């Protein structure tokens, strides 16, 4: 499985396409092996498991489902305008052959989801507009850090929406800031 291109999540996702077609098809098969699903359910599951970081578009999911159906790895049951996809025996065999890779990929999705939840807690609004957060982590949040977080959040809101090029520039700044924060501090200062 080749998915998870580079990025600040350490072997995790970056921006843009998260999986190549074969990897996405395998993950879809794994989700179908749990139970039959509609395309939009698959989108929601991937969004939930990644904490909102990976939300595949219908333009990615439905062609993958069509391919799985055409290759007899999945079958579809049409009810009105909805299609319910089920894994076939051949699809289950593909999942079984790739179980270890699937588990690693789904674990990475879950790990990214946890990191995204943490980021949302860290950047949650002070007025209660953000998600619930662990207040013990914020007890250590000195005034300067809190003010800087608020300034960053405000700057991102003011720049939004941004172009792709501007998004790449902003991501590079944020990745550099994250690297600087994680760098060990000099012994003499504090």
Image: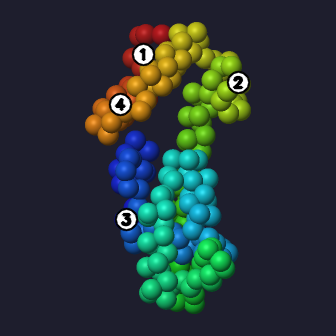
Residue 134 placement (x, y as % from top left): 70, 30
**Of discs 1 and 4, which sits in the foreground?**
4
Q: Mark 2 points at which residue?
A: 128
**Of discs 2 and 1, which sits in the foreground?**
2
Residue 170's label in the rendered image is: 4
Say how many tags the image has.
4
| Element on which disc 2 rests | loop
Q: Which of marks 2 and 1 is nearer the N terminus?
A: 2
Q: Earlier in the sequence, mark 3 or mark 4?
A: 3
Q: Name the residue under label 1.
A: 187
Is residue 92 visible in the rendered image? The answer is no
Residue 93 placement (x, y as % from top left): 53, 86
Q: Residue 161's quadrant in the figure?
A: top left
Q: Earlier in the sequence, mark 2 or mark 3?
A: 3
Q: How far apart are marks 3 and 1 (CA)?
A: 44 Å
73 up-or-down from 104: above or below = below
* Between 39 and 18, the one nearer to me in the picture: 39
Q: Residues within 10 Å of mark 4 (few under 14, many from 20)?
A: some
Do the residues bearing badges 3 and 1 touch, measured as CB atoms within 8 Å? no
Q: Residue at x 38, y 47 (%)?
A: 15
Q: Earlier in the sequence, mark 1 or mark 4?
A: 4
Tell me: 188 left or right of 111.
Answer: left
Q: Residues within 10 Å of mark 3 (few under 14, many from 20)?
A: few
Residue 142 placement (x, y as % from top left): 59, 12
Q: Residue extending furthest left?
A: 165
Q: How far apart are marks 2 and 4 (CA)?
A: 26 Å
190 up-or-down from 162: above or below = above
| Element on which disc 3 rests | loop
């Amino acid at each position: 499985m080749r998915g998870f291109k580079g990025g600040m999540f350490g072997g995790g996702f970056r921006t843009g396409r998260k999986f190549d077609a074969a990897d996405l098809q395998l993950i879809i098969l794994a989700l179908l092996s749990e139970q039959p699903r509609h395309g939009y359910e698959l989108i929601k599951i991937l969004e939930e498991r990644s904490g909102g970081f990976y939300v595949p578009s219908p333009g990615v999911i439905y062609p993958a489902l069509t391919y799985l159906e055409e290759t007899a790895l999945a079958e579809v049951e049409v009810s009105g305008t909805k299609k319910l996809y089920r894994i076939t025996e051949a699809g289950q065999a593909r999942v079984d052959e790739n179980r270890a890779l699937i588990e690693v990929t789904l674990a990475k999705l879950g790990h990214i989801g946890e990191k995204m939840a943490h980021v949302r807690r860290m950047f949650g609004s002070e007025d209660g507009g953000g998600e619930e957060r662990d207040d013990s982590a914020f007890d250590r949040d000195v005034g300067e850090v809190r003010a800087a977080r608020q300034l960053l959040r405000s700057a991102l809101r003011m720049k939004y929406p941004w172009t792709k090029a501007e998004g790449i520039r902003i991501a590079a700044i944020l990745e550099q800031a994250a690297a600087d924060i994680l760098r060990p501090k000099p012994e003499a200062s504090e």
